[in-house]
């Protein structure tokens, strides 16, 4: 096995931005242009991205920059994906309740896509949407989940504003925050519940016709 070597050279004027990008990725998984324009501009440049990638690979991580949705994402370095003892990157272990919330948030994001420059929803409308999809979660757990999503740059909002008119910003990083296996399990549960509701509605309609 060959020795691991790190050979990067950071210009003095880029030193702080380099450190901030690395720390932001390790702390929040995502760098979003809409939220951190300066950091995204830095990491999206190929030479800077390569330096950050080389640095992160030393600890088993890597970085993906998606210029279509304008985000940078921490991910597991492919060569270390099967290495024993290295925790997977960029995947947060959410509870089933939190995955239900993420599904609703992602649907709202897709519904709003293209209508405005920012993808936003009012807190009151968001809560109504959760209720409409029968997401069974109390206010304390909902608040904790929203703050967790905010921490990992999936959404953004003012934690001091609890009014129905509070603005919640939805980020494209919502589509990357999934553990695939758990996402499939939660989606299957939703589909099953949806089919049960449709069957019940059809049954009620047939009884009314009779």
Image (cartoon, helix red, strand yellow):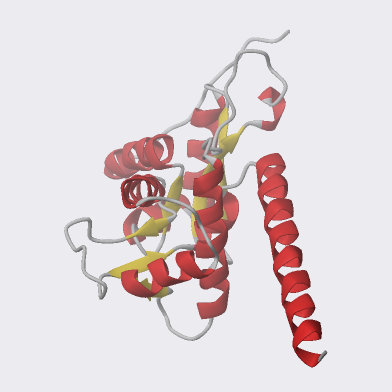
Is residue 31 toward the left or the right of residue 13 in the image? right
Q: Which residue is outermost to the bottom?
A: 209
Residue at 53 percent across and 62 percent down: it is 134
Residue 147: image x %, image y %?
A: 33, 48
Residue at 78 percent across and 79 percent down: it is 202
Asked if one can make out residue 23 in the rendered structure from this viewpoint, the answer is yes
* Front residue (pair 74, 6): 74
* Front residue (pair 208, 125): 208
Relative height, residue 74 to residue 103 (above, below): above
Instruction: Place residue 24 in its image quadrant.
Output: top left
Instruction: Place residue 91 in its image quadrant.
Output: top right
Is residue 58 toward the left or the right of residue 166 in the image? right
Residue 65: image x %, image y %?
A: 55, 52
Residue at 59 percent across and 19 percent down: it is 86
Residue at 57 percent across and 68 percent down: it is 107
Residue 185: image x %, image y %?
A: 71, 45
């Amino acid at each position: 096995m060959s020795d691991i070597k790190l050979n990067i050279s950071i210009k003095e004027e880029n030193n702080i931005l380099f450190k901030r990008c690395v720390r932001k990725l390790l702390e929040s998984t995502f760098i979003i242009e809409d939220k951190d324009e300066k950091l995204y501009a830095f990491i999206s440049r190929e030479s800077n991205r390569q330096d950050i990638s080389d640095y992160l690979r030393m600890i088993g991580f890597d970085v993906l920059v998606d210029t279509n949705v304008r985000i940078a994402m921490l991910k597991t370095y492919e060569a270390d994906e099967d290495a024993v003892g290295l925790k997977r990157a960029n995947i947060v272990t959410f509870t089933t309740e939190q995955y239900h919330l993420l599904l609703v948030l992602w649907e709202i994001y897709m519904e709003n896509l293209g209508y405005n420059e920012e993808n936003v929803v009012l807190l009151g409308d968001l809560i109504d949407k959760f209720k409409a999809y029968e997401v069974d979660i109390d206010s304390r757990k909902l608040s904790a989940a929203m703050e967790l999503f905010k921490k990992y740059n999936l959404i953004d909002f003012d934690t001091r504003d609890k009014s129905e008119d509070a603005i919640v910003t939805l980020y494209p990083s919502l589509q990357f925050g999934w553990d695939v296996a758990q996402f499939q399990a939660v989606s299957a549960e939703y589909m099953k519940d949806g089919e049960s509701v449709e069957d019940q509605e059809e049954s009620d309609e047939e009884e009314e016709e009779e």
